[in-house]
Structure formats: structure tokens, C-alpha cells
Image (tube, grey):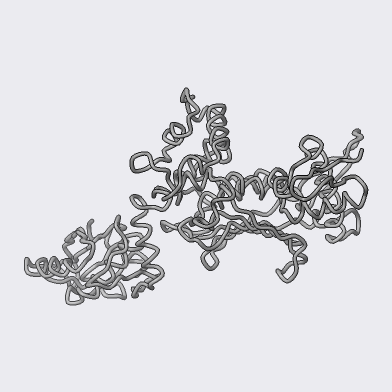
Amino acid sequence: MNLSHLRTLIAAGESLTLELKKSTAEKERACRSLCALANVQGGQVVFGVTPAGKIVGQKVSDRTLEELAQEFQGFEPPMSPRLERIPVTDGDAASLEVLLVHVEHAAQAPVSFRGIPYERVLNTTRVMPRTTYQRLLIESMHATNRWEMQTAEGYGIDTLDTSELVVTIEEAIRRGRMEDPGTRDPMALLRGLGLLVQDDQISRAAVALFCKDEPVAPEFPQFSLRVARFKGTTRDEFLDNRQYAGNAFALMRRAERFLIDWMPVAGKIVPGQMARIDTPALPVEAVREALANAFIHRDYASASGAVSVALYDDRLEVISPGELHFGLTPEMLFAPHESKPWNPWIAKAFHRRGIIETWGRGTLKIASLMQAAGLPVPTLQERTQSVVMTFVLPDAMVRFRKGGTIGEMEEKSSERGSEKSSEKILRHLRQESTLSAKALAERLSLSPRAIEKQIDLLKKDGKLVRIGPAKGGHWKVIE
């Protein structure tokens, strides 16, 4: 760098990536700033320039460089900042030098100086908060010690839903995302998906993707989904509230089923056609992408929290436990960005299954689909230990017919959903009369309580009769 380029660099003053020091007498404070810069995105510290941007220069001797090198030994993990000497050729500082020190973003963040980590906020350096330090530490360990690739102790192939595994392989083959392995042996399929670790042990990613519903709760309570339809725009009262446990694919289907039952629908008659065309309030593909992102990127290491779907009168919220990592911000996610999935092996399985198309483009795809539908782009927020994507429901969709209200729409939607559920229950019981409410709930992706309510209604309507005791008896469908 020459003197002209230096003047351009310092013209805007100190910033997130630039610190100015009058001389190396301030080397200790400068090293704190170098530590902070390395923990954020890298940058420069310039010796021989006042904070006001005046070039004053200094004498740079071998002793000066030795003292700086000794100060740099306080970095942990070790860093090797790059030094550049720039001669000052004019003004009062002629024959002196400016010393430019560069640091890159640390590959092994967080970096500390003399045992204390620092961070850069705007143009100032401060001690890093404990929560930030812990997050950076987890991110630094992510490549080699992340949750998804640890052994699932006590889990074997018998604890997995192998039919779900085979469906994933078949879809991947059909979509051209993998070659046919020539076998359907579950262990061979898991090996091909990269989901076996440490001498063919089942990984936690394999359990998250393919576990059976029932045995999962004690060891992995985080494999869960919460869905709710709230009345109004707050959480004071809900119209429907359910919680499910199971593998990520099964939970994804349950979330979609819930939204099919409750999502407002706009209907219109197209001129020249007899049928009415119903359009969901939000583009189905956009909502599906948001749900997939929630399951792919959630923090599975935390046993608390569940992927949540909250539908209000005016909005839909898709909530994923965890935080944004690797320096990503909500704003960056709606611009072209590098893909950095927190759970890359889980993301690969979703990609092969055909649920997501391209890594790093999920939020961009959502924005594009919403804009194509003439709807506002959803917002993305970081709340306490969670990331929330919010879709605003368009006004035209929250009215039921002309002058109607959301309450009327919900009543009609609930009636339609109940009728469909009852028909499905009768169909299943005609085929297999000994099915329990629990078994019906699993097949229909409903809660056992909802099934029992429908069965009570069918019995009252004279469409269903119980023959024999609760255990050992069967159902008779009255035609």
C-alpha cells in the first residue's frame, strides 16, 4: 500500500474494520482491537495516524517490531498479524513511517488477548459477552464435533423407521440425486447417506431423520413439533393446539397437515368455468420451504424447545429453536449468501428427498415466491434462543366472503376439516375394524384426543358402534 491508498483507507475514520493509533506506545490497546477484529470479520490497525485521521508517522525500528511481536504472543489461539510499513514522504512526518497491521477473521474463533476475548461494535472495542463467547466456541467446534455426527447411544437399526429411509432413497434416485445403491439393506443405505459414525454406529442425525415416534421422547425430547391456531392476534386463547414427537420427515408432514386444515383459503369463480378455484392465503411452496428450513437448521443440541407453527388471524409464524451462526444476519439471508447449514447431513437428506432444492437459496426462494404472488416478503427475526419467520396474511384472505370475518372462516374451515376426518376414520375402520384411537391418530396425523372426539360424534350420529370391550373388541360401521 502506498501513501495515497493509506489516505483513502483512513478518510472515513475508524469503523467496524479499522482502528487508528497515534503510535506503538498504544500497542496493548491495539492488540485488544486486533483480537476484536479477528473475532468479527478481520480488519486493520494503523499506527502513526491520530483518531482524527491525521498522519503523524513514527520511527519504526527493529526494537519496535520486536516489542510488537512479543505483544502478539498474548493471542490465544495464536495469530500472526501481517505488518506493512508505509513511508511518509511529505509534510511534517516526512522520513517517518506508518505501520499497518492486518488480521483476517480467525478460523479458530473466539480469540482472546491475555485471557480476555474482545469484540468489535461499530468503531469501538469491548469485552465480549459470555453468551457470544460460548456461541463462537460452539461454532469453532462445529466442523469436527457437531451434534448430528455423534453416536446415538443405545440406538440400533430396530429403532428406526426403515420404510421412511427407503422412501428417502427411492425419491433421491427418482430425482437423479443419487445412484441406485443396488440394495435396500438399512445399514447399507445409512452408510451411503453418510449417517453412520465410529465403526458403523447409528448417528444422531440418522435418529433425527428416521426414528420411530414412540421410543424417541425420553432420550431426545427435542424431536418434537408444536402447532397452534390462536384466536385473534395474541396467544391469549387458541382454537387448536397440538404437540407431536417423531422424526423430522414425519413432523414436517404433520405441520403441513395442520396448515391444510387451518390456513385461510380464498375462493373465486373464474368466468367461463363452472368450478370455483380455491387459493391458499400463502404460496404453498414458500411455506413448505420455511418449514423445511426450521427442521434443517434448528439447534438439535438443545433438549428444550420444538419447531413451532403458530397461526394467528393476521400472520403465520414458523419458529426454529437456536440462533443464526457463522456471522449470518436476517438481512444477509435475504441476499445472495454462502450456504452454511448448521446440520449439513440433515440438510443433505432433505435435499435428496426433494424437500429442498438448492442449498443457500431457501430464503431467497421464499422471497421470490411471495413477490410473484403479489404478497409481502416475510420477516426474519432472532428472538430469545430462536429464529422466527413471519408471513403476513393478506387482508383479502382473512375475510370469509363479502363482509365476513375470520371467525366465520375458521368455523367453516373447522367444519370441513371435521367432515374429512370423520370420513377418513370410517374408511379406515371399514378396512380394519380393530384399530385403536391411537393407531388412527398416527395414520391420520391427528391427536388421539381429536380422534376420540370424532368417534364420539360418529357414535352419536349412529354411524359407528363399538362391539365388545375396549380391549379385544372391534368397531362396526353403520352404512
Q: Residue at x 62, y 58 (%)?
A: 308
Task: State left or right for residue 90 relative to residue 191.
Answer: left
Q: Nearer the viewer, residue 425 or 364?
A: 425
Question: Which quadrant is the C terminus positioned in?
Answer: top right
Q: Residue at x 91, y 52 (%)?
A: 460
Task: State left or right for residue 309 relative to residue 237.
Answer: left
Give the quadrant of residue 64.
Answer: bottom left
- Specify whether residue 448 is in view: yes
Q: Nearer the viewer, residue 244 or 37?
A: 244
- Specify whether residue 55 is in view: no
Question: Which quadrant is the N terminus positioned in?
Answer: bottom left
Task: State left or right for residue 29 relative to residue 148.
Answer: left
Residue 350: horizontal and vertical position, in percent?
Answer: 53, 41
Measured along the vertical axis of the image, is residue 419 above or below residue 323?
above
Q: Residue at x 40, y 47 (%)?
A: 149
Task: State left or right for residue 140 relative to residue 100.
Answer: right
Residue 245: horizontal and vertical position, in percent?
Answer: 60, 53
Residue 147: horizontal and vertical position, in percent?
Answer: 41, 53
Measured along the vertical axis of the image, is residue 316 above or below residue 149?
below
Q: What is the count of numbered marks?
A: 0
Residue 2: horizontal and vertical position, in percent?
Answer: 22, 57
Residue furthest out toward the top: 182
Q: Nearer the viewer, residue 428 or 388?
A: 428
Residue furthest out toward the left: 62
